[in-house]
Image (cartoon, rainbow, N blue to C red):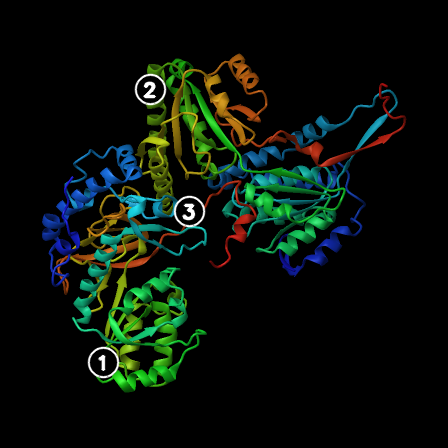
Amino acid sequence: MMIRQRCPAGPDRELDGLLDELAADVPGGPLAVGDPRIADFLVGFGRTLLEPALVRRHPELAPLGFFLRRAELDAQLARIAEPDVAGARLMRFPRGLVFHIPPANVDTIFVYAWALAALTGNRNVVRVSPRSGAAAELVLDRLGAALADAHPAVAATQKMITYDRDDRATAALSARCDLRVVWGGDHSVDAVRRAPLAPAARDLTFPDRASYAVVSAEGWLRAAPDERDRAVADLYNDSYWFDQAACASPRALYVVGTDADAAETRADLFARLEALLAARGEPLDPAMAVHKRVAAYGEAAVGRAARLDFRAGDTLAVLDLADPLDTPRGWLGAGAFPAATLASLADLAPMLGRRDQTLTHFGFAADELAAFATAVAGRGIDRIVPFGSALSFAPVWDGYDLPREFTRLTTVGRPAQARR
Amino acid sequence: MTIAADPGASAVRDFVFARTQDDRERHLLPELRRLTEHHRANCAPYDRVLRALGVPAGDPGARIADLPWLPVRLFKHHDLASVPADAVFKTLTSSGTTGAEVSRIHLDRQAAADQTRALSRTLQAVLGGRRLPMLMVDTPSVVKDRRSFSARGAGVLGMAGFGRDHTYVLDADGRPDPDAVARFLTAHGNAPFLVFGFTFMVWQYLYEVAARHRFDLSQGILVHSGGWKKLADRAVDNATFRARFAADTGLTRIHNYYGMVEQIGTVFVEGPDGDALYCPDFADVVVRDPVTWAEQPVGVPGVIEVVSALPRSYPGHVLLTEDLGVVHGVDDGHWPGKRFSVLGRLPRAEARGCSDTYAESQGDKPA
């Protein structure tokens, strides 16, 4: 089974050879949680992502750069440190070998998960999709450059590879890893799960999710024009980065309020978004334009969308939902907003389930959001975050605390007393 | 609503490359407007789309280019028919680029007859009225199972009726059969004969075999379709294709055509000069700007919309394709109306999402 070595870059090689190399002794000794050899490398790599010229071209890489600052990494390590309790210690160690299957085309999400797995001392193999986009290529480039200054332990333990459709490669990696991290559609998760893991190994899966934006009409109408413009810019980033296809990208927009307030809010919000799109002047790729038309017309054909409104050269499509709670969860293309009005935030609760991930909000009071979370009662929605934060990766993702998932605990000394 | 009882007859007259663009606006537009209302009345999903777009009932557009279009891929995701299910006589399917995506086109008895007649009148313009001996650039296996209407099989089967004494250029295993071609030419090569096939197969199997064996195809009339993508790798474009056939086999009467299962029966045919595709009188094309969807001026490439008065049993009379093309001129070519070329296909928009990390690579298997 030949694989392509993306980082460290190298000639195509046999997967078995790579796996043997990963099993060998690490130069300078085994990696620890928070290993300085890895941390220094991550910080150096993150710095290169914040170069102004790069940020202009790939603004989606800047948050990753910030995420990899020393203070941020230290804060993550401090957060998972276990305090000594009554003479007993819980020591945290890496799980071992982590096999990542990241999403094909959300160019950077795999870097966050891998970085946390590396920071916690794991050896990692990341299968980068052969279809990965420009930002992913750039990330691999920068990783390669950062490796040059890094301790040899980094190149020996961190491998980004690519292989085409090959169930044998997935099977071999699955059999050898201690933790398998699978991102992507339900089909992907099912396909990968056909490859057995070692008995003590486990999966961490991130299947299909859908996310929504909610706006309080009262809050919107109260907001000053510049605040509304900022909100629209945030909504733009949440939605148009990754072509609205990330799990956390809002796939529908709900305005909460009276009919009159909601209508005014909606008209103003979409007018501002249209103005922003016109000002940016980035034409829609023709294939994307056709895709959006196909998707939107399809929603109208089945009666889910009562009205279609294409604006700003099709960069914005607004679909009026016939039934607010019957919204297409699938991907309609970049810049497509099924939209509806709700009398109260709680009206959204009945449609939410495990599939639903992120709610981005504007104009609500904290207690309204908490009341909503209580109404949903954990059946769905893992994150309720303000406009502009949909794609901000957090170490707690999809309800998992990743640094904890990437480590295991060893008890030293007298075990904590269990009450009998 | 009343509609022309036999649209095939009204749409297809003796010589089907006769209407100027003004004639089309004058005669074709009213038919298309009536068809739009017919489909609205008989296909609820179609009506819902037009209502959602705000197209007023009874007034779908003042020019052909104003009529509302459906994206052709909609037929891959939705069953759209304007006849009751029990009136469906034949359901055609297209082969999609990925195996899962297939258009389903429903024809009732009338629509099936109309499309056959329209195709026949269109091809008579280049073939004449007689059935000619026919060389099929394909394998007989492709039409073995008549129930599975693969695009290739349907094409071959649909064309077979225009010829007689069919000879296949490939044997049942798909290997070139030069002896069969030689026998055909001995029997029929001294008078006009028909050659049909898909463009890349015509090049790969007929041209290469005929050139090697120095076959004389000078009496042939070649009708071919299927796009140039596979030949682009071999640096063969339409001009090269025609020049090499003429120089190495004597074949000069060559007509490329453009059509799709979603508008079955309507084909846009290359004129005798080989300069461009022309629209039969019951059809038209509109090349659109992919950002504004406005009609492009002559000479400016865009996305091709195909228009035809034929589709009555499903709302396929105005379809936005995923092909890129350009109109070269209007009423200024060998035949009247628009003349245009197909330039290639739009790439598929890919979900840049968390979805399909792994399954996507499984989907790449050839269909």
Q: Do labels 3 and 1 share a chain?
A: yes
For the N terminus of chain A, the image quarter is bottom right
Label 2 vs label 1, nearer the camera? 1
Label 3: state its secondary structure.
loop
For mark 2, what is the residue?
A263
Q: Pointer 1: residues within 10 angstroms few (<14), some, or many (20+)?
A: some
For mark 1, what is the residue?
B219
Instruction: Residue B349: give its label.
Output: 3
Find residue B247 and report its horizontal and vertical position in percent: 28, 80
Q: Pointer 2: residues within 10 angstroms few (<14), some, or many (20+)?
A: some
**Picture quadrant of residue B195:** bottom left
Find residue A16 and report its horizontal and vertical position in percent: 71, 58
Instruction: Residue at 45%, 53% (x, y): give it.
Output: B98
Q: Which residue lies furthest to the right in this view?
A: A414
Please name whichever residue, A61 or B102, is drawn nearer the observer in this view of the structure.
B102
Please name whichever residue, B7 or A406, is drawn nearer the observer in this view of the structure.
B7
Q: In the rendered structure, which disc, 3 or 1, sits on the residue that comes first in sequence?
A: 1
- What's the residue type where badge 2 is placed? Ala
Find residue B238 and report its horizontal and vertical position in percent: 29, 68
Residue A230 seen in render: no
Find residue A90 and report its horizontal and vertical position in percent: 82, 29
Question: What's the CA distance linking mark 3 and mark 1?
Answer: 45 Å
Residue A59 seen in render: yes
Q: Are marks 2 and 3 on the same chain?
A: no
Question: What's the CA distance linking mark 2 and mark 3?
Answer: 32 Å
